[in-house]
Amino acid sequence: MLKISENSISNLVSLSNFKSYQHLKNQHHYNKKRFYYGIFIMALLLVVVFVPWTQNINGKGYVTTLLPEQRPQAIQSIISGKLEKWYVREGNYIKKGDTLVYITEVKNDYFDPNLISRTQEQVTAKSESVTSYDDKVIALRAQLASIKESKKLKLQQVENKIIQTKNKISIDSIDLSAYKIKYEISVNQYKRTKELYDQGLKSLSDLQEKELKQQEVNAYYLSQKNKLENQKNMLLNFRLELSSTAQDYYQKIAKNNSDIQSALSAKLEATSNTSKLRNKLSNYQLRQKLYYITSPTNGYVTKTIKKGTGQLIKEGTDILTIMPSTYDLAVEVYVQPKDLPLLKINDHSRLRFDGWPAMVISGWPEKSTGIFSGRIFAIDQHISENGKYRVLIAPDTERKKWPENLRVGTGTYTFILLKDVPIWYELWRNLNGFPPDFYRDGSEQEKLSKKIKVKAPIKSVK
């Protein structure tokens, strides 16, 4: 078989009759096919690695609502009470203002069935006391005006007495001067008469007459002098009376002002108590309205937390949950902190919802089926408790609509689209653990800066 001998036996032996030969011959044929197939596959892979691939950031989340007031709302009771009656059950559609639950009081401060009417009586009584204090203040002010007028008249009277006394003092001073002159004249007449009597020219009766007249004039002089002193003392008394009268009226006026201030203070206190009672009355009236818990919005009763009747409810305790009937869907996903710088508002994303079959090729989103489109609506500025950043994605109205039967809480798989790169670059990036390529060209960077400038005031308001 090796053909090293000159005597050939090829014409004597047929190799095709041997199975081993057939097997070796076929194996050689198969090796050629594998070689060609390998070359074809290598060429195909070489072509594929240059095919564009869309970089993306994957994330898991769930369906939520775009606005806070559209999310499931827990209904609480503002006051403590005992659950008496249910007006709804799970699955019921309710309108805004419909009664959900009726509760009764459990605090002994509010057991009185006539609580509001009794409180109203207290308010009326306090209001009347305020009016009486007003009347008292008016009377005291009238009394004050009368005292001031009386003071004015009394002081004027005393001042008139002072003027009269001054006039009397002036007259008495003149009279005293006249009596003094008369006394001096009588003294001189007595001396001359005595000299003449000593010389025998006047009789004793003449001398005694002059002496008597001297004594009489002296008496009038002393009387007038005492009268003048009395008038001066009276003037002094009137001046003291003027000061004393002014002081007495000052005390009366001060006491009257004090009474007025006391009445005003009592009025203010009564007004304050009246306001407190009115506040209490309003609280009682509003509290009775809180016995019936109503729906704040249109929606569906999704879950009743409290069961049966007769159960005690504390204020702020959840009773049931309502899902608003009208809402705008959105998707809440969480991304790694390293991916946060790559995201911006209005970036495109693709979404796959639980329960909707889909075939996803993250790098070729246009080739994927069963997925839906969205745009980034908001990005949290603070990291969440799970160590990631929350991103809110709204529906992309320009593309495929989201399913009508989609409900809040549905699980979602999201991949946010970034830059288009060759497959070989994406493989090389993943092998090296590099982040996605977030460099942008000049026009795209300029658009991004404009959007950031526009969005900045809105974020500051938030």
Image (cartoon, rainbow, N blue to C red):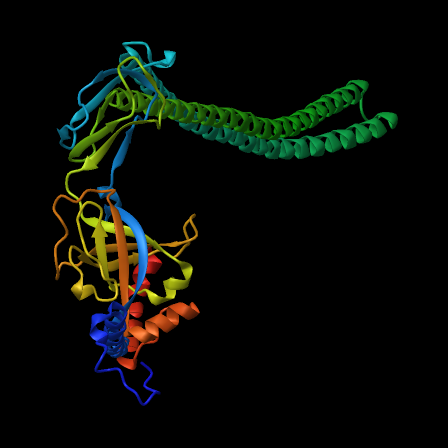
Q: Quadrant of the C terminus?
A: bottom left
Horizontal and vertical percent position of residue 371: 18, 56
Q: Quadrant of the N terminus?
A: bottom left
Measuring 13% from the left and 49% from the top, which residue is drawn there?
Answer: 403
Measuring 63% from the left and 35% from the top, which residue is drawn there?
Answer: 174
Horizontal and vertical percent position of residue 73: 26, 36
Confirm whether residue 434 shows in the render.
no
Q: Nearer the viewer, residue 39 or 274?
A: 39
Horizontal and vertical percent position of residue 153: 45, 28
Locate residue 107: give its quadrant: top left
Q: Using the image, determine if residue 282 lies above or below residue 343.
A: above
Horizontal relation, residue 397 to residue 10: left or right: left
Instruction: Farthest residue to the right: give it.
Output: 198
Q: Using the image, determine if residue 242 lies above or below residue 434.
A: above
Q: Nearer the viewer, residue 55 or 237?
A: 55
Measuring 62% from the left and 28% from the top, which residue is drawn there?
Answer: 240
Q: Using the image, determine if residue 365 lies above or below residue 446.
A: above
Q: Nearer the viewer, residue 225 or 217?
A: 225
Horizontal and vertical percent position of residue 118: 30, 12
Locate residue 112: give its quadrant: top left
Horizontal relation, residue 145 to residue 217: left or right: left
Q: Nearer the viewer, residue 139 or 430?
A: 430
Confirm whether residue 221 shows in the render.
yes
Measuring 19% from the left and 56% from the top, which residue is drawn there?
Answer: 359
Horizontal relation, residue 61 to residue 252: left or right: left
